Amino acid sequence: MTHMTTPDELKGRIPTGLLSFPVTDFDAGGAFDAVGYRGRLEWLGSYRPAALFAAGGTGEFFSLTVREFSEVIAMAVETCRDQVPIIAGAGYGTQVAIEYAREAERLGVAGILLMPPYLTETSQPGLRAHITAVCKATRLGVIVYNRANCRVSVETLQRVADECPNLIGFKDGVGEIESMVAVRNAMGERLTYLGGLPTAEIYAQAYMAMGVSTYSSAVFNFIPRTAMIFYQAVMERDDAAIAELLRNFFLPYLHIRKRHPGYAVSIVKAGATIIGRGAGSVRSPIHDLDQDERARLATLIEALGPQ
C-alpha cells in the first residue's frame, strides 16, 4: 500500500527546494494528451523540484473538465510516484472544491492547493467557512492560495489554522508587503510560505527577506536549468547573479507576459514549444502569443544556452 504523505511531511518538504506547476498537454484537437504529459513530468521531475502542482493555474485547471482533472492527476501521481510529491489544484465553490480535493486524495496526491473561488465576491466569514470545509473534507495537507477573490486576512487565517491542523501552507499571489509581513509575523512556523505571484523570480529576493523560503516557478517549464540556477542564487544571496538574470531574461520576459491578461499561462506554453517540448495551444478564454511575441521570447531563451 502506498504511503500517504502526512500534512507535516508535506509542510517539511515544501521549503527544501524550488516548486513548479507543469503545463497540461493538449493535442492538435484540443484534447488532453496523456502521453505528452507523462513525458513532460518525467523530464521536469529529473531536475528534482521539491514538489509539482498538477492541474494548477499554469496547468489550466480552470479549463479542464472533471474527467480531464482526474486523468491529469492520475497521470501525475503515476509518473512521479516516490520521486516528486504531487500537489493537486482544487477550486470553484466549496462543494465542488471538496469533490476535487477528495478525488485527488483518492488518486494519491501529497497535498491540495486550494485556489480562489470562481467569480463571486467573498467575505472573510465566507472564506473562513470555505477553507475550513475543504480542509475538513480531506486528510491531506492544504495550502491556501491568497490571490484574486481569496484574500485571506490574518484573523481568518489564524482561526482556520486553529480549527484545521492540516492547513499547512500559505501561497501568496497578491504581493502586498504589509499583508505578507503581518501574516508571517502572526503565524510564524505554524505554516509554510510560498511565493505565488506570476513570474515569481521577480519578487524572490523581497519575499526571502519576509521569511518566504521558496516559490513556484513557471519558467521551470521551459528553462529548468536556468530556473534552478536562479533559485540557488536567491538561496545563496548571490546578488550579482540575480541581477544579471533579471536584466537579461526575466525583465524582458515580463514585458511580453504583461501584454495581455492570461499571458502568464500563454507565454509558458509558448516557451515549451520553442524548446521543442510543445504542449499544444492554451484553451480559451485566454489565447496564444502572436508570431512577433514568440520570436522575441525565442531570442531570450536562445541567449540562455542549453537547458
Image (cartoon, helix red, strand yellow):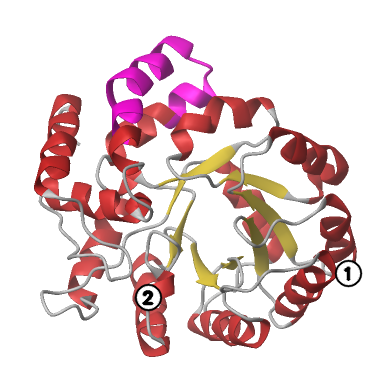
Regarding mark 2 in the picture, which secondary structure is present there? Answer: helix
Q: Tag 1 or tag 2, which sits nearer the N-term? A: 2
Q: Which residue is mark 2?
A: 63
The reply, left or right, for residue 289 in relation to residue 21 is: left
Figure check: 251 above or below 172: above
Residue drawn at x 69%, y 64% is 7
Image height of 56 relative to 249, above or below: below
Task: Report the magenta stretch's main SS.
Answer: helix
Which residue is drawn at the image coordinates 79% and 67% (left, top)? 123
Residue tagged by mark 1?
163
> Is 245 colored magenta in this rendering?
yes
Q: Tell me which residue sits at (87%, 43%) in the image.
A: 186
* Mark 2 crowdedness (10 Å alpha carbons): few <14, some 14-19, many ≥20: some
- Quarter of the image with the C terminus in it: top left
**Residue 180: in sight, yes or no?**
yes
> Residue 258 placed where, x, y %?
36, 41
- Check residue 256 for magenta coloring: no
Image coordinates for residue 280, horizontal then vertical, percent = 17, 65
| Point 57% across, 73% down: residue | 119
Type of amino acid at the residue the image marks with label 2: Ser
Relative image position of residue 224 (x, y in whole percent): 30, 41
Density class for disc 1 (Cα within 10 Å; few <14, some 14-19, many ≥20) is: few
Q: Is residue 238 left or right of residue 47?
A: right
* Amino acid type of the residue that numbered disc 1 sits on in the rendered structure: Glu
Farthest residue in the top direction? 240
Q: Nearer the viewer, residue 247 or 189?
A: 247
Q: Is residue 47 something that shows in the picture?
A: no
Start-end of magenta stretch: 231-253
